[in-house]
Amino acid sequence: MRLLLAEDEPSLRRAVTVLLEKSGWSVDAVSDGSDALAYLQSGAYDGAILDIMMPKLDGLTVLRRLREAGDGTPILLLTARSETDDKVLGLDSGANDYLTKPFHTQELLARVRAMTRSRTAQPDTRLRLGSVTLDRASFALTAPGGSVRLTNREFQILELLMANPRCVIPTERFLEKIWGFDAEVEANVLWVYISNLRKKLAALGADVQIRTSRNAGFSLEETP
C-alpha cells in the first residue's frame, strides 16, 4: 500500500512518515502542494494525506484539481483548523476524511486504514505494458520468460515508468520521488538500478525496454 504525505512542517512530516512506514505503508513525503499534485498525477497511490495550509498550492486546491480530473484517490485532509465550515468545505470538495491537528497517532492510523480499505479490497493491483505485468502488492515482475520479485527501489522505479508509458521522466524526478528531497544521492545510483532492471527485463523476455533520452531522462516503451 502506497501513500502520499504532503506536510510543510519538517518535524511533523518526518514523524508521520516514520509512523506510517512502521505500520506497513510505503510513503512518499513532500513539502508543498505543487509537488503533491505532481506526484499524485504521475504515480499510483492508495491514498494521500494533505495538509490544507501548504506553500505554492494549498491542500484544497490540490484536492479540487484531482477530483476535476476524475482522480478518485482517497484523500485525508490534515490541518490545524477546527472550524466546522472548513471541515464542510473540505468534504464538499471531495475529501474522504478530515483530521484536525494536534491528533493522536492511533486515530490517524485508524482513519488511514478506513480510507484505504476499499482499495485494499480491490483484486487487481497490477500494471501492464506489452507482455509485462508489475504487481504492486507483491513487487513481482512477470513476462513471458517467468517472474521475479523486485527490490523496493527497483519496484518504485519501474512502477513510475509503467504508470507513465512512453513518457520521458527526468532523472531528478526519480531521485526526488524515490530517495526524497533531502537525500544526497547522485544520478549514477539511479543508473545502477536502471541497468539492473534492464537486465531483468531482458532475462524475462519482455517486449518493453527502458530507453535513455540524453540529458532528459528515461522512458519505458514497447519494442518494435
Image (spheres, rainbow, N blue to C red):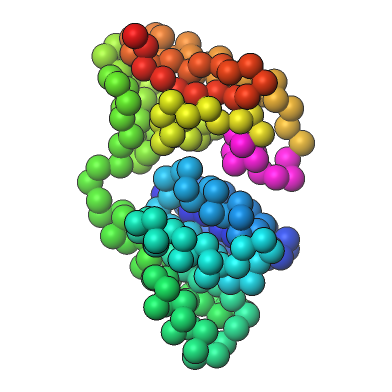
Above or below — where is 140 with respect to 145? Answer: below
Is 46 left or right of 32, judged from the image as shown?
Answer: left
Instruction: Please determine whether, in this image, residue 80 is positioned above or below residue 186.
Output: below
Q: Is residue 213 visible?
A: yes
Q: Is residue 162 above or below residue 109?
A: above
Quarter where residue 91 is shown:
bottom left
Q: Which residue is found at the position 39% from the left and 55% from the top?
A: 69
Q: Is residue 178 magenta?
A: yes
Q: Residue, x 30% and y 37% (percent of image)?
A: 126
Q: Is residue 140 visible?
A: no
The correct choice, above or below, for 194 with respect to 106 in the image is above
Tally the numbered discs.
0
Residue 46: % across, % down? 40, 53
Q: Residue furthest right?
A: 184
* In the displayed structure image, the side of residue 130 where residue 6 appears, left or right: right
Q: Is residue 200 magenta?
A: no
Left/right of residue 88 with respect to residue 16 in the rendered view: left
Range shown magenta: 173-183
- The picture places residue 217, in percent across and down from the top left corner, at 60, 24
Q: Quadrant of the C terminus?
A: top left
- Rendering quarter of residue 192: top right
Residue 180: x and y in percent read 66, 43
Q: Residue at x 25, y 42 (%)?
A: 124
